Image: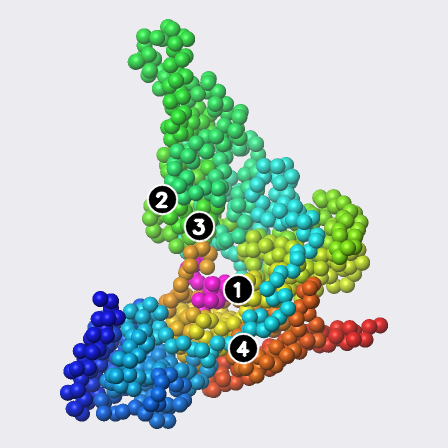
Amino acid sequence: MTDYDKSFEALVEFEKKSNEFLKSDLSESDTRSKILDKIIIDVLGWTEFDIEREGWVRVGFFDYEIKTATFQFVVEAKKNFQEFKLPSKGNEVKAKTIYDGNRDVIDQIRQYLFERGLAFGVITNGTQFIIGQFSNTQGADWKEQKCLYFKDLEDIKKNFDKFYDLLSREYVGKYGKIKITKSSNIGKTIVKDSNLKRKNFELVRNQISQHLIPVINKVFEEIYNTESLEAKKILEECYVRNKDVKKYNSELGFIFSDTPPTFDSRIVPVQNTDSTHEQLTDQLFVDTSVLPDPIILIGTAGAGKTTFIKYFTEVLLSKKQKKNRPLVYLDFRLYTSQTIRDTKYIYQNIIEQLENTYPELNLSKLNILKTIYKQDIEKKKDGVWAHIVNDISRLDEEVSKFIESKQSDPLVHLEAISKYLLHKCSKRICVLFDNADQLNEADQKEVFLLGNGLNRNLKCISIISLREGYFYKWKDKPPFNAYQSIVYHITAPPYREVLKRRINYVMTKFDFQELNLSAANKSIKFQKGSLEHLFKNLYDTLFSKENSEVMEFLEETSYPNTRQGLENFKSFLLSGHSKITEYMSFDYGVGDGIPIWEFFKSVALDSNYYYEASKSKVINLFYPSKNNTNHFTKTRILNYLFNRLSQSSKKYDYFKVGDVTEQFLKAGYTIDVIEEELQELFDYKLISTSEYTEDIEEETSLDSNSMISITSVGVYYLKSLVSRFHYIDLVLQDTPIYAEDSFGQLINVFPDSDEYGNRDLQQRKESVESFIDYLKSQEKNDKKFVSNFDDQSIMFDVVESLKQKLSKDLERLDKVIKRQKNPA
């Protein structure tokens, strides 16, 4: 028998005994103990552990607060003869419909919910139930919310599936809430709910992309393969050293920087790359009588740990130095969980690299092998080989077999090689463990144990690269707290310098020949050097002005993740929206270079005709979280954190999630919605935690005790991007519209895309203006909460702020539209 069947039987049994209760005028206390306890525990499956009875808030005692690990709701019991006024048909109604007839009981539970910061409540007299979301949420009037009601026990029996699905311990735990479907709150979006031309198609990549991809693969990706002379040359010329890089943000008035963390005393407080190189060199070349502790290189995702390692080992260290410290590089992107745990496999890989990379060591030569195993061979000659010592031929044969047997076990053989190099040659093997941070947690720990094992058992130098988020997470846990390590922080280089060097390398080192392209039955010829001119125009766009908007967009949305910044640049080069053939023209670029709105569109849309939040690198701040319908929540949260950080006396400060949600309760929100919105902002990297959890791959859930702050990306969205025409023009396409008339007006002026990805500029402007009008009407719902605050860090006028900053873009557009209508 299922839990559902047992519950239904318990309800039938309760109904048989309920008549005697109903004949009595039970008090609220008796209603609780004699009726509700039976329903809540016996029928709905809750336990005493889940229930808090008669809790106190400022407005009085509530009867029950029922809790799961992630959700809670209030049950208010009334006298069993206090009959509620409910519609005679159906089980669903808007709260405003039943409010006047049940004003007292609804007002009472609303007071309890507000005091507790909760949204959902149940009002019952033992036989009738009203279930709903009785507090303002996301700025929406609670009276517009749907309530579910059950008129009597017979109604509950007839609709037991619905009753059980709403209130049982099983289903509240499963859904993480009382699941009341909100069909009235489903907004329409332009990209999903209108018949746009080409919305299910993609633009064809620009024809030049096939000629750009070889350049991109060589220069605009992480430099880790240095086997070819050209690749090593790119590394030498494109590597950027840090000179205590600081990223000053004028909006905040202080510095965002990729500085060495201070959460562990083992981290060397060095940011300057040259200083890190020097200290690392000192560690490697300490006297061979002293075994250095394992070295850990930490840095954020995409900060350039691999590039640092490659530059240090391939460029900075001389051949003579590497002869004295033979380097073995293990790239764990090439390993599986199985091979990571196969120590023999890894040891064999190390042996092969030593033999192939350092042939001058002669580790595969017989005379050296005899030296490596000399002590063992001498023991054999004094023992089991004593009778063949004078038979040189037979002795040599036995020695060869013996050495082969040793070589067949990589664990034994590598240990013997290490001892030979250390004691006979004064050379210590150095093994670099790279990209372990791209493995799962269990595999990363295996790599760490392997590195420490090599250090301790084979007396090798072990250098292990990790993300600082993982190091923070594990630093006080086994196996990381069992070993002493030296930790260096690899600081991300300034992104603009990385891009500048790489574009400059392309312009000076590549020999671009003439190109012949065919399109629409036409042949287009580009003269020699046209592709070079493309990169020159890009260089001028990014670096000719001190405050390039394109450079700001690339840098602010990626730093310190240099890899992500390069990915965004690559997206522009390959996007179907990029007018590459125009940018290649020798006549192009006389003015201000490639405009920000064209660059932004290419990165945001890639090769899609329209913007969809789930497919884009660009985040839509106006898109509410799953259980929210307020377009301004994310912006208000970011502004609140921005103001808190600006007012802090600390260089960088974090704030408790519980304190943030407490403030937003006064704005009509509930705890679950604010935590949901904070989680999205964290997932988008617009806010960060004090535990560096944004730097790890595993999904991290914020809770009320998490300490959070706004990131430099969050500041850029809040203070620069959200009020720009090119941003609003795109994100309005996938913002849910909750007013039918506003959606109709927006659809009426929204222009379709042509086959080249272009949309009518006049209609785009009208669409943005219509969208702003809609946002203005929606923001009126927030005005009622302004008086709850002493300042405007939360309840500031979002739309008015947008309009003031947007006005410059609209003025510029008017001039462009006028020129289009009246060409000279």
Considering the numbered disc 2 on the image, is that residue within a helix, a strand or a loop? loop
Q: Residues within 10 Å of mark 1 (few under 14, many from 20)?
A: few
Q: Which mark is residue 267?
A: 3
Q: Amino acid at mark 2?
A: Tyr
Q: How far apart in space, not on screen, are marks 3 and 4 (Cα)?
A: 50 Å
* 397 sits to left or right of 66: right
Q: Residues within 10 Å of mark 4 (few under 14, many from 20)?
A: many
Considering the numbered disc 3 on the image, is that residue within a helix, a strand or a loop? strand
Say which of marks 4 and 2 sits in front. Answer: 4
Residue denoted by label 4: 737
Residue pushed farthest right? 824
Q: Is residue 744 visible?
A: yes
Say which of marks 2 and 1 sits in front. Answer: 1
Q: Position of residue 122 (x, y in %)?
A: 31, 82
Image quadrant occupied by the C terminus: bottom right
- Tell me which numbered mark, 4 or 1, is placed earlier along the sequence: 1
Considering the numbered disc 1 on the image, is that residue within a helix, a strand or a loop? helix
* 785 sits to left or right of 610: left
Q: How far apart in space, not on screen, are marks 3 and 1 (Cα)?
A: 38 Å
The magenta region covers 678-693
Residue denoted by label 1: 614
Q: Magenta segment: does it hold 687? A: yes
Q: Magenta segment: does it hold 603? A: no
Q: Position of residue 344 (x, y in %)?
A: 39, 33
Q: Which mark is residue 483?
A: 2
Q: Are marks 3 and 1 in contact (CB under 8 Å)?
A: no
Q: How far apart in space, not on screen, are marks 4 and 1 (Cα)?
A: 17 Å
Q: Amino acid at mark 4?
A: Ile
